[in-house]
Image: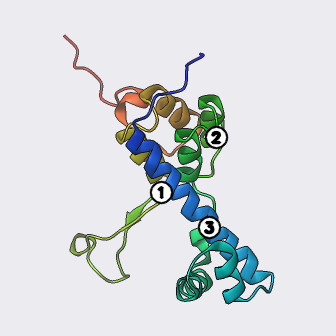
Amino acid sequence: MTATMKEFTPRQIEVSSRQLARLRWRREIDRAHRGGERPADIADRLGGSLKEIETEIRTLENRPNQLVRKPMEVIDEYVVGERSREELIHTLSTWPYTFGDLGVTPGTHPMSSDAWNRGTWDDVKYAETRGLIDEDAFKQIARAADLPAAVFPQWVNGSTHTKPAA
């Protein structure tokens, strides 16, 4: 099936562009810091304040997983025109997804928490509900990703309910 690239609103493009720029900026700070560059030199080269760079370095040292590539980055690249719809579908169809769960401390009743620990599949669901990927692409990704039955929307695999005999 061939489809043309989805048209996005200027706001969608702006948000995706900003998110990509920030992620790339943070990765450059991390690369430079790990390579031995002084925070002051990083600030001069990237145009940020010394305090801002030092804060980012501390944050990234404490939470290095913030720089790991996630489905939302791939989706943002699609929105800004850096990748085709076919590339988007292929990449997200082969992604090793994780699934969100309640952020519950062991021994705590699950209904007492409103925290949600996001999984990578949440990025794809978010993108579909926000119109960043179309329904057909979402269905193709969900089918190819071989997701557990519990996370399939009814319309991806068809209804799980049988119709009563007439």
Q: Where residue 110 sits: x, y (%)?
A: 28, 71
Q: Where residue 146 sits: x, y (%)?
A: 57, 40
Residue at horizontal 65%, vertical 41%? 91
Q: Is residue 81 left or right of residue 102?
A: right
Residue closest to the far right: 35
Label 2 Cα neighbours within 10 Å, binned few <14 / some 14-19 / many ≥20: few
SS at circle 1: loop
For label 2, the residue is 82
Q: Quadrant of residue 154?
A: top left
Up the image or down, 164 lies above or below 17; here it is: above
Residue at horizontal 62%, vertical 67%? 25
- Give me the C-alpha separation between circle 2 and circle 3: 17 Å
Label 3 Cα neighbours within 10 Å, binned few <14 / some 14-19 / many ≥20: few
Q: Which mark is residue 25?
A: 3
Residue closest to the far left: 166
SS at circle 3: helix
Q: Which mark is residue 18?
A: none
Instruction: Say what amino acid the circle numbered 2 marks.
Output: Glu
Q: Nearer the viewer, residue 106 or 62?
A: 62
